[in-house]
Image (cartoon, rainbow, N blue to C red):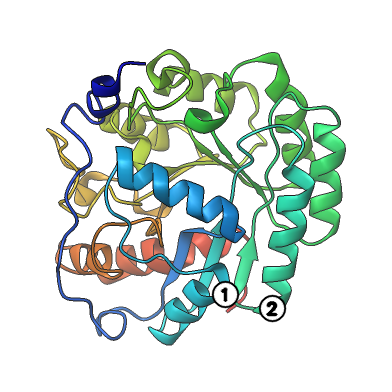
Amino acid sequence: MDETDAFDGYLGVETPLPGLNDIEGPTIPATMNRVIDSHVHLFPKMIFDAVWNWFDTYGWPVRYKLGSSELLTFLFEHNIDHVVAFQYAHKPGISTWLNDYMVKKVAEFKGRVTGLATVFPGEEGAVDILDRAFDQGLKGVKLHVHVQCFDPVGKAMEPIYDLCARRGMPMVIHGGREPKSPAYACDPYELCSADRIEQVIRTHPDLKLCIPHFGMDEYDAYTRLINDYDNLWLDTAMAVTDYLPVESPVSLLALRSDRILYGSDFPNIPYAWDRELKCLESSGLSRESMDRITWKNAAELFDIVL
C-alpha cells in the first residue's frame, strides 16, 4: 500500500478527520429517565494502544484514552446506568484470553456491565470457545467484519449463528460497509452489504442480530430491514452525532423505535462523551420512543435488569 493511499477513501474524505472541542456535560440530559450505553469497547491496554494508534492515523483523534476500568468509572460517574461492553479478536488464538478479560471486568463492576464474548470466525474450536464464554456469564458475541475479514454468509459463520440462536445469545456484527479504508486488510464493500445481512436473518430466524452504526452507509436498506424482520436491531453509534461526512443523515423519526439501541462507541470517539445523547434529545422523539432507544430495547435484547 502506497503511503498516500492510507489517507484516501475513509468515508470518501481525507483522513484523519478532526477532533472536536465541544463541551461535555456532567451527566445525562435531564429529559432522559435512564441510559444504557449498548456500544462500549473494553480492551487490555496493549490492544487499546494499537487501536488508538490506528484511529489517530486513519480515523480521528480519540478523545478519551482511558483504560477499561477508568472508562467504565467515567461513564457511571456521569450517570450512565449500565454498559454493554464489546471487544473483538483481530487474529486467531486470542479469543479465550479476551473473553477471560471481559469476564473479569464484568465481575469488577458487578451488576452494571453486560459483557459480550468474541471469537475469530473460522478459528479452531470457535464454537467451544463461545460455549465456554457463555457459561462464564458473557451475554452475546461481538464480531467486526472490517477487522476480522470474514464473510457474514460464509460457511465459517454457520456454526456460530446456530450456537447463538440455540442459546438465545444476541450477536453484534459491524457489518455495515463504512468506514472503508485502505488500512483494512480487506475491502469492506466486498464483504458487507444489507443484502448479506438480510440473508443471515432470513435463514436464521431465531438469531437475534444487531448491526451497529445504523449499518452505515446503507441507511435506507436497513430501515426497510428492521421494518420487515423482528430479529434485527440497529444501534446509533456515531450515526446521529452530526460528525461523520455522510450525505444523508439518519432520520430517527422515520425509524421503528423498538429496534434501535443507543450506543456511543466510547471511548473511541473524537468528541464529547454525551454528544450523541444531546443529538437524541433534540431529535423530536416522543417520550416512549426515547425510553425505548436509550434503555428499554437494550434491556430486553441483552436481558438486563436495572
Q: Secondary structure at mark 1?
A: helix
Does residue 304 appear anywhere in the picture? Answer: no
Quarter of the image for the C terminus: give it: bottom right
In the rendered view, would you say 46 is above or below 74? above
Question: x, y (%) of residue 235?
Answer: 40, 49
- Numbered tag placed on residue 34 in the rendering: none
Question: x, y (%) of residue 100?
Answer: 77, 58
* Location of residue 280 by image quarter: bottom left
Mark 1 residue type: Ser
Question: x, y (%) of residue 287?
Answer: 27, 71
Mark 2 residue type: Glu
- Numbered tag placed on residue 108 in the rendering: 2
Quarter of the image for the N terminus: give it: top left
In the rendered view, would you say 214 is above or below 122? below
Q: Earlier in the sequence, mark 1 or mark 2?
A: 1
Question: x, y (%) of residue 74?
Answer: 43, 79
* Residue drawn 19% across the image and 63% down it: 279
Q: CA distance from mark 1 to mark 2?
A: 8 Å
Query: Left or right: 282 with respect to 28?
Result: left
Say whether marks 1 and 2 touch (CB < 8 Å). yes
- Closer to the eye: label 1 or 2: 1
* Residue drawn 35% across the image and 32% down it: 222
Q: Residues within 10 Å of mark 2 (few under 14, many from 20)?
A: few
* Location of residue 66 by image quarter: bottom left
Does residue 148 appear anywhere in the picture? Answer: yes
* Residue drawn 82% across the image and 35% down it: 127
Q: Residues within 10 Å of mark 1 (few under 14, many from 20)?
A: few
Q: Secondary structure at mark 2?
A: helix
In the rendered view, would you say 244 is above or below 295? above
Which residue is at the far front? 3
- Numbered tag placed on residue 69 in the rendering: 1
**Which is nearer the eye, 115 or 256?**
115
